[in-house]
Amino acid sequence: MRRFRLGNLFKRNNILLTVVAVLVTAVVVIGSAQTIAKGRYTLDVWESFVISGVALGAVYALIAIGYTLVYGILFMINFAHGEVFMAGAFTAVFAAQALASEGLVAANPVLAFAIVLVVAMITSMVVAILLERLAYRPLRGAPRLVPLITAIGASLFLQYTFRGLYGAGIKAYPTFEIFRGSIEIAGLVIPVAKAFVTVIAVLLMVALYFFVERTRTGRAMRAVSENKDVAAMMGINVDRVIVITFAIGGVLAGAAGILYTLIFNQVSYTMGFFPGIKAFTAAVLGGIGNIVGAMLGGLALGLLEAVAPFLILEGYNIPSPNQLKDVIAFSVLVLVLIFRPTGFLGRKENV
Amino acid sequence: MGAFLRRALFFGFVAGLVVLHLALVGLIVKLDERNLINGLVTIGTVIPILVALVAGFLAARPMRRGELVIPTPMTGLLSGAVAGLTGGLMVAAFTWLADAYSIRDVLINASPKLVQILHWGMDATTGTLALIVGGAAMGLLGAVIRILPGTLRRGAITGLSAVVGLALMQTFVVQILTGLSLDFISTFFYARDGMTEPGAVVALVACVVGGWAWAERGHAVRTRYTTMTPTQRRNIRWSFIGIAILILLSLPMFVGSFLATALDTVGIYVLLGLGLNIVVGFAGLLDLGYVAFYAVGAYATAVLTSGASPAFAPQLNFWLAVPLVMLVAALIGLTIGAPVLRLRGDYLAIVTLAFGEIARIIFLSDWMTPYLGGAQGILQVPAPNFFGIDLRQPEKLYYPILVACIIAAVAAISLANSRVGRAWTAMREDESVAEATGINTTKYKLLAFSLGATFGGLAGALYAVRIGSVFPQELNIIVSINALALIILGGIGSIPGVIVGSVVLVGLPELLREFSEYRLLVYGIVLVAMMLLRPEGLLPNRSRRAELHEGEDDSKPDWDEQDWEKEAGAETPTPMIT
């Protein structure tokens, strides 16, 4: 796939793409200009959109890392990763409710939250490892679509297994009093929950970055993603590295699940689908296979999703633009894949 | 021996997990409502038994360790029993746990009712013992079946599955027998709910004998067929096709409206499957947003024909609208296809998935409500009218659906055997090579996409008139997954496979209403299991099967003549779907 350059635009086979590009740009610019001209939202409102977007983006980034790590090593889209995310949050709700009824949530919220977080991370990790071991490992080396179809099947299987286990209803997390209210930093009023989500997500991402860059296992992971065969010849246990990769993806997805519930507060068996696809979009946006790319992609997508419906669609007087936020996210996916399939920071040969 | 026992432990463990999974997702309790044999056996109670049987059967199979090791009868039987015992112990441990502690707060299905079903209605101690002993006995029985001589074993397997099948299909069989005024047969075999005991025994014996006879003599019949002249073979094939068409044509006359509705749904999914098969099976482009075309077809039909269409209501005749609808779907297919076709396989899948969701969200949004009705959809889609006959009833609507399916199937078959079909095959196998041999891949991809879209649009049109209204909530990703699952079950690229797939995955759940909430769980299992065990599907087309198994050695020792084919398929899958 050729890289997108302005010069390429006007070659004959790219006429269609040129038209699409011009149209999309026009829609975005005109929409934004009209919205700003109307001045319906004050600066405060825009600020709150951005803050929500950053928190959401941090969650997407955590999930996206799971996609990107697996893709970097196995070149497969782990379609069931959204369900790994769901599994942790949906399981940990029982821990949270139990702790709330024991009174620990009120007495020692930090400890209670830590327990819930660990429960979710462990559950997601176990699900991710089982997924690799039972569904994906036997298909190693099969043509690309075979593991993809397996992953779709595994995703359905997990969704409906958890629905069967815990019920189809929506469950609510108990409220942690410490996350109520807002704080003011440099003139910005930030809800505590969103600030906390962002901080935890960033800490986890920094930890992951150091793990991959500085530890022996991290080096092994990078080696395997560079070239599996050569890595194996250098004495790296490739299977083990792959399991570790899935485990890390699972842990981060589990954490993301709990952070997600701090924003939206409720869980159900379907909660993994949209965040899953959006995190995949984020991974593609940042350049799939690239960890920093996934982080930036997540952030960008969260911001887009929070701001774009109001910024672009409002200008066209489209009623309830927030209904169309998923359309924006998916359109970003489509547009990125059409115009720059390697993403911001991606390696060239992947697409 | 040690290796066999270790494997038996493993199979027993897996069997235990399977039963526990089915129990904890609630399937066993739910299916306990469905009687198989009047008041004696329900599907719920029969599931653990069947699982133990299969575990015992598998544990007694020969093992490939460098060369093939065939267990002595003693080892085989012991392995079977061990497998059954392990599974039984696991389930027994669970029932004890569920009795002793309240785990129901978390696992909502671990109810006293479940324990009661697993214990066969006996008290806790007897029931737990019965589980362990019964598990071992069933594992042993499975091993016995495996060790029987080939033809008898086939007979036993056919017999068992046929009786379960007959019991499951009760509604269908009784309905047809009543339609043919053969009530006396149905009253002998079926009680109001489930089979009668004598009926079940007679059916079992008849099916075992029949299965055994076919296993003994079937080979001769097949040999005779293959030694016939091509003309004779063609005659036979055509007479079979003729009979099949006659049956299909007369079906609605005696199945009643409930079954006719189910048949209509199956027909619509056959159509969807045929369309998706062109895209996925022939051209090798995994499209997960196929529902978009279905939705476009349904909405276009509603807008063109319904008087209740909010903004633009030309109220066309259905027959006039259909070509327009197909044209619209094809154009949408081209529009969506053109920009994304340069993407590689798995990216294409995700992008099409995104398109499917975009379509649904837009149909549902307030933005489009003034034109497409939003969440309320478009009501009052009129039924087609065929020279004065109103086709509203499902029995009558069946005919246009059947005709559409036949046209689509014929079109698909002729496409597959044409220059276009060969170009698709080449492209699917290796895109760069295809391009190098002068195939314009973009053109053929677009062709596949828009043809698939056309079929999908037609299916959507029929769907709209069948329901009589269009709702955006129903046009979700599940439809795409459904269509994908059925072509994968039947065999990617195989047209008979599409039909079998829709009957199994769409028709059966219609008959088993209790089952409906577990439908997607089963789809998930089907997708994973097919990819792991038999990626070419149940009824693979010939060249695809050859592609998938080309790596296999044809000169394997025939250690057990009848088994060779099956074992080879089961143990060494070399998935090579592009």
Image (tube, rainbow, N blue to C red):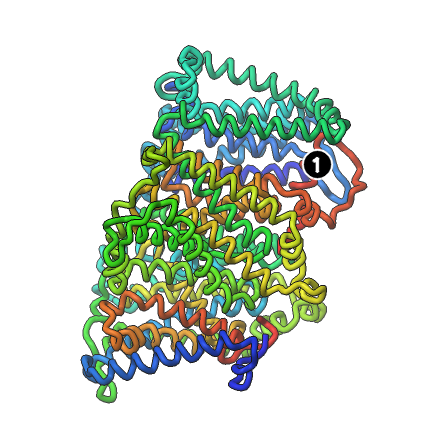
- Direction from residue B271 to residue B302 in the image, left or right: left
Which type of secondary structure does the marked residue at label 1 adopt?
helix
Q: What residue is at 45 percent from the left and 67 percent from the top?
A: A280
Q: What residue is at 74 percent from the left and 24 percent from the top?
A: B224
Task: Name the chain letter of the residue that bears numbered label 1.
Answer: B
Q: What residue is at 70 percent from the left and 32 percent from the top?
A: B563
Q: Position of residue A294 (x, y in %)?
A: 46, 74
Q: In which quarter of the image is residue B497?
A: top right
Furthest-front residue in this view? B387
Q: Position of residue B301 (x, y in %)?
A: 35, 50
Is residue A130 at least partly visible in the picture?
no
- Report the front residue among B391 and A83: B391
Residue type at tag 1: Glu
Q: Quadrant of residue A281?
A: bottom left
Q: What residue is at 51 percent from the left and 35 percent from the top?
A: B87
Q: Position of residue B324 (x, y in %)?
A: 40, 53
Q: Position of residue A53 (x, y in %)?
A: 31, 75
Q: Residues within 10 Å of mark 1 (few under 14, many from 20)?
A: few
Furthest-bottom residue in this view? A186
In the image, residue A134 above or below residue A232: above
In the image, residue B244 above or below residue B330: above
In the image, residue B113 above or below residue B568: above
- Direction from residue B68 to residue A39 in the image, left or right: left
How many numbered tags mark residues here? 1
In the image, residue B465 above or below residue B83: below
Which residue in the structure is indicated by mark 1? B565
Is residue B468 at least partly visible in the picture?
yes
Image quarter (top left, top right, bottom left or bottom right) of the C terminus of chain A: bottom right
Image quarter (top left, top right, bottom left or bottom right) of the N terminus of chain A: bottom right
